Image (spheres, helix red, strand yellow):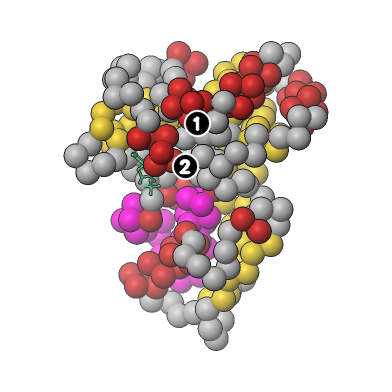
């Protein structure tokens, strides 16, 4: 049995540069990861099975098509390896801009790769076919992403930085947020992400105005530095200058009945 943590992904900045003829968008984004995430367990078995546990299990279906079973199928088509029993302990909210499903898919590939001796480098083509954020999650390190997000270049991160993730409980459709982007290129990713933006914030806030309230309350917390929405939302995050201030902020935000995850950047 192998265990993998499907770490939550953050976009410290996300610049949308252009709409593409294929319907996707040309991005420049800074990916980072936090220490916490979903827990995935995989073991060889007589027949395939998939079980879901954890606080967000009910939102996903064990029967239907999800990114874990799709990743396992794609792995088997490419590399073989037989049947597996997979358990996903779901701690991250679904459709929330922190790559839950993408991280789960990448963790599935990593686990199967470990079981069957396939190197991570050899699984990027499969990851790309599963979703725009799956290659970044498979890479698993702080990186600049271009193209759909699949062209990755490692950069220095801020390991150990205290971070607080907050989700107000509204699922936002990534496709709809991208559709509502105004088409204006506001320029490339700067070297310092604090001078960057998330260009998906305005369209996501139009769909889910509660994001305004989350960002306002996060920004107001003592010790909060870079504060922004991640991905297509609705999860927002703030970096903190100490774990004590992050934990104090977590109490304030949790009192709103919002999901909070105090963690650290990896
Ligand atoms: O690649 P993935 O299936 O995760 O993307 C979900 C949706 O998000 C796409 O169908 C597309 O509408 C939108 N998207 C986009 N440009 C990107 C990434 C995603 O328009 N770079």
Looking at the rendered structure, the secondary structure element under dot 2 is: loop
Q: Is the residue under label 1 in contact with that under label 2 (CB below 8 Å)?
A: yes
- Segment colored magenta: 101-129
Locate the N terminus and report the quarter of the image it occupies. bottom right
Measured as percent of width and height from the top left, residue 100 is found at 54, 48
Decide: is 144 above or below 248: below
Residue 173 shows which numbered tag? 2
Q: Residue furthest left?
A: 21
Front residue of 145 and 198: 198
Residue 223 shows which numbered tag? none
| Dot 1 alpha-carbon crowd within 10 angstroms: few under 14, some 14 to 19, many 20 or more | some
Measured as percent of width and height from the top left, residue 105 is found at 48, 57
Decide: is 156 above or below 21: above
Looking at the rendered structure, the secondary structure element under dot 1 is: helix
Front residue of 259 and 207: 207
Locate the C terminus and report the quarter of the image it occupies. top right
Residue identifier under label 1? 207
Front residue of 120 and 108: 108
Q: For disc 1, does the CB lie below 8 Å from ligand 1?
A: no
Residue 118 highlighted magenta (yes or no): yes
The quadrant holding residue 240 is top right
Residue at 61%, 55% (x, y): give it: 59
Residue at 25%, 32% (x, y): give it: 19
Residue at 36%, 21% (x, y): give it: 189
Asked whether residue 106 is in view, the answer is yes
**Mark 2 or mark 1: whose residue is earlier in sequence:** 2
Residue at 37%, 35% (x, y): give it: 178
On screen, residue 16 versus residue 155, left or right, reads left
In space, the residues marked 2 and 1 are separated at their CA atoms by 9 Å
């Amino acid at each position: 049995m192998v265990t993998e943590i499907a770490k939550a992904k953050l976009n410290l900045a996300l610049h949308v540069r252009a709409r593409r003829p294929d319907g996707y968008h040309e991005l420049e984004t800074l990916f980072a990861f936090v220490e916490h995430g979903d827990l995935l367990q995989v073991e060889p078995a007589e027949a395939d099975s998939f079980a879901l546990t954890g606080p967000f299990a009910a939102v996903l279906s064990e029967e239907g098509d999800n990114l874990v079973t799709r990743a396992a199928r794609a792995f088997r088509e490419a590399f073989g390896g037989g049947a597996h029993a997979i358990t996903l302990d779901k701690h991250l909210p679904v459709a929330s801009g922190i790559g839950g499903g993408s991280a789960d898919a990448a963790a599935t590939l990593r686990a199967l790769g470990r079981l069957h001796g396939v190197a991570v480098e050899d699984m990027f083509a499969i990851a790309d076919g599963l979703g725009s954020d799956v290659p970044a999650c498979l890479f698993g390190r702080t990186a600049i992403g271009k193209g759909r997000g699949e062209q990755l270049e490692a950069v220095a991160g801020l390991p150990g930085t205290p971070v607080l993730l907050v989700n107000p409980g509204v699922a936002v459709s990534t496709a709809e947020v991208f559709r509502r982007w105004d088409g204006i290129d506001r320029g490339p990713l700067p070297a310092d992400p604090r001078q960057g933006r998330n260009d998906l914030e305005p369209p996501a806030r139009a769909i889910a105005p509660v994001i305004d309230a989350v960002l306002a309350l996060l920004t107001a917390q003592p010790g909060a530095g870079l504060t922004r929405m991640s991905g297509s939302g609705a999860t927002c995050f703030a970096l903190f200058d100490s774990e004590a201030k992050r934990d104090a902020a977590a109490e304030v935000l949790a009192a709103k009945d919002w999901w909070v995850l105090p963690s650290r950047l990896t």
